[in-house]
Amino acid sequence: MAHPLPTSMDVVARGPLTGSIAVPGDKSISHRALMFASLAVGTSRIEGLLEGEDVLATAAAMRAMGATIERGEDGIWVVDGVGVGGLLQPETALEMGNSGTSTRLLMGLVSSHPITCTFTGDASLSGRPMGRVIEPLSQMGADITSSPGGRLPLMVRGMCPAVPIEYTLPVASAQVKSAILLAGLNTPGITRVIEPIATRDHSERMLTGFGAKLTVEETNQGRIISITGEADLKPQDIVVPGDPSSSAFWLVAASIVPGSDIVVHNVGLNPTRIGIVTALRMMGADITELDPRTVGGEPVADLRVRHAPLTAIEVPADLAPSMIDEYPVLFVAAAFASGTTIARGAHELRVKESDRITTMRIALEACGVPCEEYEDGMAITGSGGAAIRGGARIASKLDHRIAMSMVVAGLGSREPVTIDDVSPVATSYPVFFRSLDALTGRGN
């Protein structure tokens, strides 16, 4: 379970990372496993669930709408679902904490049920725009009242029966796609989502596994995902692979700290999620896949990473959807490469838990790394493998990925890097610092 983390932290170089760790379960898959199991009639079991604050917010919300969700002493979560169409009216507002994924997907789920839900969140989540989800769900018949700017708190009054739509995503967003598909589960007829640029496909894979009638077609317009409504989902036993987004911090840390040689076990390698591995290999990172296998319908392997000199690249813009959450730590890798790395095509970074472009530019510049900010990315001039200066106090902006990325930067700095608040790390990786201690020889 999640444990309280400290706020301010000083990070100093610790020498090589060695040994092996397993990262927590994939956050995207964990959210969906709880939601879809809650919509099945019968008992599902989930092994390897990420027990971070974001996922626990999803569990609490599904309980509030009628599902029975319990964690066994063996760490396996057992879910007794209410069935599609069976969600109950929650007695109080659904508190989403910091989780944008929970909020957007649950908005879709509620939109085609005859219930009304109020969504609230912390300061960071309340600053994130929900308009991109509100638009298609409103077309399906949901009545959504938001705070100014399409932000939380907001209220969703579901429509039953909702209206099936065909919707082309204006931006590459798996959350928007999934919200529409979830609304389509309880909508008579066929709901279609067209994505010109492919995004992570965990919803499609898992919905199919639960028995939904779902098809994916590759066309000149892009991928067309069609779901037939009034679905009857069957309970499943799910094994959640390790989160590639959490793995990314160790891939970069081992790459930039001389003498490092680590193995990260059980990493999910879904093709729609491994842009960070592709980009790091382009830069010269030494990443080897060991024991490739399939777990719960998802490709998985252990990753061995050894220190290697990195060279600047121009990051292909088409990698953005498959690594959007990993850009902050990629920027850190670029800070240690030879030459100037240019990463563009990542407009989505502006509307994450923080504005991750500006926040990372300020943080890296404070540590002595030359940067140039673009509307859709950054150029970072690296140190050629030498330690960066460090010696700065960094504002994490309540963003877990900023905090963890700058911890990695601190491992390669001459002077300590102080991060003002690392407590948001608990939202996605509650044992992050325990893993850091284990890899740097400070674990028990």
Image (cartoon, rainbow, N blue to C red):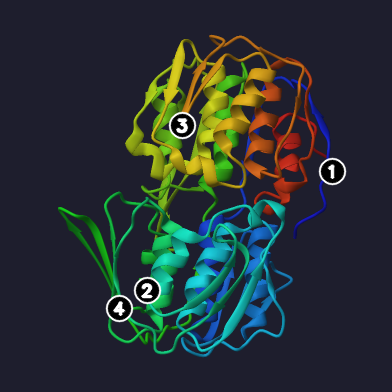
Q: Is residue 180 left or right of residue 1?
A: left
Residue 114 image offset from top left, x and y in percent: 51, 89
How packed mark 2 is, by other alpha carbons closer than 10 Å (few <14, some 14-19, many 20 or more), is some
Can the viewer see residue 404 in this picture? yes
User: Which one is in front in this view, the residue at disc 1 or the one at disc 2?
Assistant: 2
Dividing the picture into quadrants, the one containing residue 49 is bottom right
Query: Residue at image x 59%, y 35%?
Result: 249
Residue position marked by numbered label 2 in the rendering: 139
* Residue at the image position 62 percent from the left and 17 percent from the top: 259
Q: What is the three-letter code of the residue carrying label 2?
A: Gln
In the rendered structure, which disc, 1 or 3, sits on the residue that comes first in sequence? 1
Distance of label 4 from label 1 (alpha carbons): 46 Å
Q: CA distance from mark 1 to mark 3?
A: 33 Å
Identified by mark 1, the residue type is Pro
Which residue in the protein does label 4 denote? Answer: 213
Cα–Cα span, label 3 and label 4? 40 Å
Q: How far apart are the two marked residues, 4 and 2, measured between alpha carbons?
A: 22 Å
Tag shown at residue 6: 1
The answer to which image quadrant residue 332 occupies is: top right
Check the image and name the residue furthest to the front.
Answer: 148
Q: Position of residue 325 (x, y in %)?
A: 52, 43
Q: Quadrant of residue 257?
A: top right
Q: Earlier in the sequence, mark 3 or mark 4?
A: 4
Rendered-image quadrant of the N terminus = bottom right
Q: Earlier in the sequence, mark 4 or mark 2?
A: 2
Q: CB atoms at circles 4 and 2 under 8 Å apart?
A: no
Residue 187 located left or right of residue 112: left
Callout 4, which amino acid? Lys
Q: Earlier in the sequence, mark 1 or mark 2?
A: 1
What residue is shown with label 3? Answer: 375
Mark 3 vs mark 4: in front:
3
